[in-house]
Amino acid sequence: MPYSTEDPAATELADVTTTRAAYDDIADLYADLFKHQLERQALDRAILAVFAESVADNGSGPVADLGCGPGRVTAHLATLGAEVFGIDLSARMVALARAEFPHLSFDQGSLEQLAIGSGALGGIVAWYSLIHIPPARVPRVLREFHRVLAAEGHVLLAFQTADLPDAVEAFDHKVTRAYRWAPKRLARLLTEAGFTMIARMVREPVPGERFGQAYLLASKVR
Ligand SMILES: C[S@@+](CC[C@H](N)C(=O)[O-])C[C@H]1O[C@@H](n2cnc3c(N)ncnc32)[C@H](O)[C@@H]1O
């Protein structure tokens, strides 16, 4: 497995330990609940298809699904032709992903501690995982995403939207502390990290969701 993360336990912050424990506890239930969710969400599949096509077009390396959970998005991207692997904080999530998708590679690690060489990746997906990073730490994470992507590499973020047009706010996420972002605000951070924005999509909540859902697609032009 050429792409790993540094030993997360060495420098772990309290919120990271809490997030890992919460997802370890809920992993089996989460995997069951969301197993077929992409099949019901044409818009989610649409933006993932655009991302997969963009990555295939530049052909500059594999895709990392950071915060992959039980691997449903990782596996979906693989069916779209992407060379993709997953990384997740939760050991139980990684175990479930490996069991369900034994043909794909999953490892435990933190998206905040990527031991990945500069320019090594063709794409990064953070599908409802960046939501657990305290906002003050997000600019550094995005700069690291930029570093590990090759030129023309793409990043795709999915997250719940904040109510106000330029806000980031903590919300009562069912698993552990999380943050909703105004798409404009997170897009600005992507730009400040060196990315060029390609697309912003916001969809209305479907039954069972409380908030609008946002998707940001950006690329590294240098
Ligand atoms: C809401 S779930 C989404 C999982 C998956 N992307 C999906 O859509 O099914 C959030 C995931 O992010 C992971 N996560 C949270 N913080 C992380 C971090 N710092 N590094 C890696 N994974 C993280 C959690 O363990 C959890 O599996």
Image: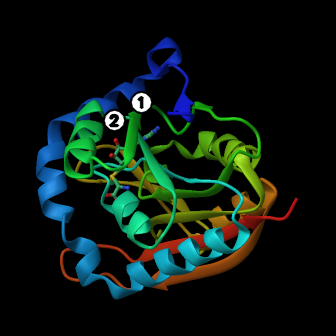
Would you say 30 lies left or right of 221 here? left
The kind of residue on which mark 1 rests is Val
Q: Quadrant of residue 159?
A: bottom left
Can you tell me whether the CB of the residue at mark 2 lies under 8 Å from the nearest atom of ligand 1?
yes
Which residue is painted at 59% across and 77% down in the image?
53
Can you tell me whether the CB of the residue at mark 1 lies under 8 Å from the nearest atom of ligand 1?
yes
Which residue is painted at 68% across and 74% down in the image?
57
The kind of residue on which mark 2 rests is Thr
Q: Is residue 34 visible?
A: yes
Residue on which disc 2 sits: 19
Residue on which disc 1 sits: 16
Q: In this rendered view, identify the residue nearer to me: 3 or 126.
A: 3
Q: Position of residue 85 (x, y in %)?
A: 46, 48
Tell me the SS state at disc 2: helix
Q: Are marks 2 and 1 in contact (CB under 8 Å)?
A: yes
Q: Is residue 164 visible?
A: no
Q: Residue extending furthest top?
A: 10
Would you say 58 lies left or right of 92 here? right
Quarter of the picture containing the C terminus is: bottom right
Q: Position of residue 195 (x, y in %)?
A: 77, 62
Above or below, comparing residue 198 to residue 100 in the picture: below
Q: In this rendered view, identify the residue nearer to me: 123 or 192.
A: 123
Q: CA distance from mark 2 to mark 1?
A: 5 Å
Q: How many marks?
A: 2
